[in-house]
Image (cartoon, rainbow, N blue to C red):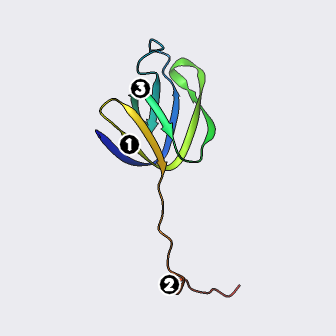
Amino acid sequence: MIMIKEVALAQIRFNTESDGHNLCWRLMLDGEETIVESVNIQAPVFTSRDWIEPINKFKHHISVKNCCVQIDTALNALITPVYIPEMPHSSLQRVAL
């Protein structure tokens, strides 16, 4: 493994500067760009788009919220959800509405 990182937002889009065979994917991890060979997403996804001012275009993404991103030495990315452990029932408080 070369990187394991928890992020609030991961955005995946095709790397238009690749040759179509190598390093085809851009990952935006909380706004920080990383280029990878492949992406395996094992978490709920949604689509999003951002206006990129310098090029005056929208860029479209497959996006994942609150996830863990692992990138190995071959630059293959694995994206999984960040699990929040459940609190035991005894620690829950009742609130009158």
- Image spot of residue 46 (x, y percent): 63, 41
Residue at image mark 1: 70
Count neighbours of disc 2 (C-alpha within 10 A) and say few if under 14, some if 14 to 19, many if 20 or more.
Answer: few
- Considering only order in the chain, which callout, 3 or 1, is on the residue closer to the N terminus? 3
Q: Which residue type does callout 1 highlight? A: Gln
* Amino acid marked by disc 2: Ser
Asked if labels 3 and 1 touch by Cβ distance under 8 angstroms, the answer is no
| Residue on which disc 2 sits | 91
Q: Which mark is in front, 1 or 2?
A: 1
Q: Helix or strand or loop: what does disc 1 sit on?
A: strand
Residue sticking out furthest to the top? 19
Image quadrant where one finds the C terminus: bottom right
In the structure shown, which secondary structural element does the residue marked by tag 2 occupy?
helix
- At x 54%, y 47%, the residue is 43
* Location of residue 35 in the rendering, given as x and y in whole percent from the top left corner: 40, 27
Q: Which residue is mark 3?
A: 37
Q: Which is more toward the observer, 39 or 60?
A: 39
| Mark in the foreground, 2 or 3 | 3
- Asked if disc 2 and disc 3 are in contact, CB closer than 8 Å, the reply is no
Residue visible at 51% across and 33% down in the picture: 12
Residue 22 x, y percent position in the rendering: 41, 18
Q: Earlier in the sequence, mark 1 or mark 2?
A: 1
Question: In the rendered image, which quarter is residue 21 located in?
Answer: top left
Cα gap from disc 1 to disc 2, whole angstroms: 33 Å
